[in-house]
Image (tube, helix red, strand yellow):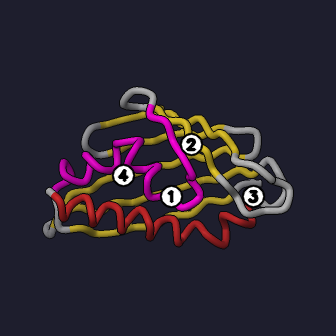
Amino acid sequence: MSLRLEHVIEVSATPEEVWRFIADPEQRARYISVVEDYTIEGDRAATWEIALPIPVIDSTITVKTEDVERRDPEFVKFVGRSRAVRVVGEHELTPTEAGTRLTNTFTVEGRLPGVERFFKKNLEAEFENLEDGLEAFLAKK
């Protein structure tokens, strides 16, 4: 079974400005609270070390992420794979009169007990972390 959640935000920035943040694997990793460490592998891949506070996992989990589809500056899809979880993230940018609508969709497939339950309870907060990161990034431009 998998969990799928969507979160939409509107920002007063161009799609190109939002793209510089959302298409960067380092920016995506930096603002996810369960990512304890990450290594960037080129401009389309990263390895995350995640710590999930669930009983069956007593160490970090290595998640290999890779962008599998890109349409600059409107869409990026990445896949993260590990022994405990498979994550598919999609970020779609749509121009609006006031800036950009960013639609974030995540699908999480837990491979260990408790993984999906954790993300069901916490994924909305992770979306908010990503939104805070985007706002901080745009404020520095």
Q: Mark 4 and mark 3: span between their CA atoms?
A: 25 Å
Dots 2, 1 in contact, CB < 8 A: yes
Q: Residues within 10 Å of mark 3 (few under 14, many from 20)?
A: many
Marks 3, 2: nearer the viewer: 2
Identify which amino acid the numbered label 4 is placed on: Glu
Q: For the residue labelled by badge 1, is the local secondary structure a helix, a strand or a loop?
A: loop
Label 3, on which residue? 115
Q: Residue 126: x and y, percent?
A: 51, 65
Which badge, 1 or 4, comes first in the chain's sequence?
Answer: 1
- Using the image, determine if residue 64 lies above or below residue 128: above
On screen, residue 127 versus residue 2, left or right, reads: left
Label 2, on which residue? 48
Reply yes or no: does residue 111 show up in magenta.
no
- Using the image, determine if residue 68 lies above or below residue 106: above
Magenta residues, as a range?
14-40
Identify which amino acid the numbered label 3 is placed on: Val
Q: Residue 111: x and y, percent?
A: 79, 47
